[in-house]
Image (spheres, rainbow, N blue to C red):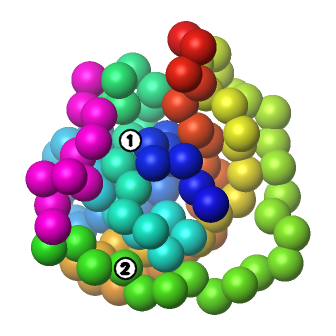
Amino acid sequence: MVSPISVVVAALAVAPSGAAADCDCLCVDGEPQTVCVSAQALRSTPGLCRFRPDVQCSPSAAAGPRRTYDAPVDGVTGCRDASVQSPATGQRITARVCDLDPDR
């Protein structure tokens, strides 16, 4: 299961066009997750999905083992590929996601 808070590297591409925010509530592996372009943005916008009860995620298709990655920056951990979907458009992409490091 994905951590309740995730950082996505370049995954806000699935956000509705014109979205100017650094964070959004997107579907990550079938679950609503706060998704930000940086750990710093995530720390200033925790729990965004709590305020978005309209976000409904469709189940994510089971994909085999996920590729994992070294953390690209300090403050994140558990980097891996994940299925990310915009609830507004239904567009789904595979993106690198990382969990916020609770010890940072």
**Position of residue 63 in the picture relative to residue 13 (left or right):** right
Quadrant that contains the C terminus: top right
Residue at screen point 34% across, 73% down: 86
Three-letter residue code for mark 1: Cys
Residue at (61% x, 41% y) in the render: 98
Say which residue label 1 marks. 36
Give above or below for 12 relative to 63.
Answer: above
- Left or right: residue 102 versus residue 85 is right
Which comes sooner in the sequence, label 2 or label 1? 1
Residue 12 place in picture, x, y as percent: 39, 55
Q: Helix, strand, or loop for circle 2?
A: loop
Spatial distance from mark 2 to mark 1, Cα to Cα?
18 Å
Q: Are marks 2 and 1 in contact (CB under 8 Å)?
A: no
Q: Residue at x 38, y 41 (%)?
A: 36
Q: Quadrant of residue 18?
A: bottom left
Q: Which residue is mark 2?
A: 57
Residue 14 x %, y %: 38, 67
Q: Residue furthest top?
A: 104
Neighbours of disc 1 within 10 Å: few (<14), some (14-19), many (20+):
many
User: What is the magenta range?
Assistant: 44-53
Write down the quadrant of residue 73 in the picture.
Answer: top right
Is residue 57 part of the magenta span, yes or no? Answer: no
Q: Is residue 67 left or right of residue 17?
A: right
Along the line of sight, which residue is nearer the eye, 9 or 6?
Answer: 6
Residue shown at the point (44%, 68%) measured from the top left = 31
